[in-house]
Image (cartoon, rainbow, N blue to C red):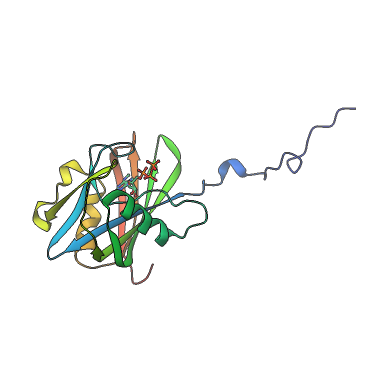
Amino acid sequence: MSVSPSAKDMQIQPNEAEKPMKPKVLTLVIIEKEGEVLLGMKKRGFGQGYYNGFGGKVETGETVEEAAARELKEEAGVVAVSMEKRGILTFHFDDNPQPWEVHVYHVPDFVGEPCESEEMAPVWFSYADIPYDRMWQDDQFWYPEFLQGRRFRGEFYFHNTHTLVSHSLQSVAQL
Ligand SMILES: CNc1ncnc2c1ncn2[C@@H]1O[C@H](COP(=O)(O)OP(=O)(O)OP(=O)(O)O)[C@@H](O)[C@H]1O
């Protein structure tokens, strides 16, 4: 007699396919000093050719804040003296089933001299000269919130990775 395996035997739940995928968690640090922000030109990998803050994936065994500090050191060569979480952005891509959850940190103080790494070339920009046309399309929406000192949450929907189709953004009291 043949017995077909039950959902339990196959270690899947009945409506597994409908469950949204757990997001991948990443960090993004923006250094800000006297009306200027430090951005890096991404030299390789995801987002190559865009200016962005410094960050990357959270690795197993580290907290989100530890990951943010590690990536800042690796990519810009500086150590954060203090950091404050200011935003959580969720990115949905129609060409990737896994959403990305990016935790944005403000670093008002750091030690060391920013220097070019294999991944990023750092450049200071005044608020008025932030190069939104050479950045991810979501940035133009949430940087103003960030630069005003607010906390925020946003959801952004992308087509073919790079084209922003729709978004929502709220300023929030707490993250
Ligand atoms: C879609 N709209 C977006 N808007 C603004 N910023 C975005 C972004 N999407 C990803 N980001 C940031 O881009 C970096 C990628 O990091 P990424 O280089 O892939 O990570 P990591 O350094 O761990 O990778 P490797 O070690 O090279 O594999 C990381 O800071 C992440 O927050």
Percent of width and height locating residue 164: 28, 42
Which image quadrant shows ligand 1? top left
Percent of width and height locating residue 153: 34, 60
Question: Does residue 159 appear left or right of residue 124 in this picture?
Answer: right
In this rendered view, identify the residue nearer to me: 7 or 42: 42
Q: In which quarter of the image is residue 107?
A: bottom left
Percent of width and height locating residue 77: 27, 53
Name above or below for residue 50 compared with residue 147: above
Question: Does residue 103 appear left or right of residue 142 in this picture?
Answer: right
At a point 25% along the width and 57% down the height, the residue shown is 30
At a point 26% along the width and 67% down the height, the residue shown is 150
Quick one: which residue is furthest to the right in this view? Answer: 1
Question: Does residue 41 appear left or right of residue 4 in this picture?
Answer: left
Name above or below for residue 19 compared with residue 63: above
In this rendered view, identify the residue nearer to me: 33 or 164: 33
Q: Would residue 160 be seen by someone viewing this image from the given angle?
A: yes
In this rendered view, identify the residue nearer to me: 149 or 29: 29
In this rendered view, identify the residue nearer to me: 95 or 45: 45
Quick one: which residue is furthest to the bottom in this view? Answer: 173
At a point 32% along the width and 66% down the height, the residue shown is 83
Question: Which quadrant: the N terminus?
Answer: top right
Q: Would residue 136 be seen by someone viewing this image from the given angle?
A: no
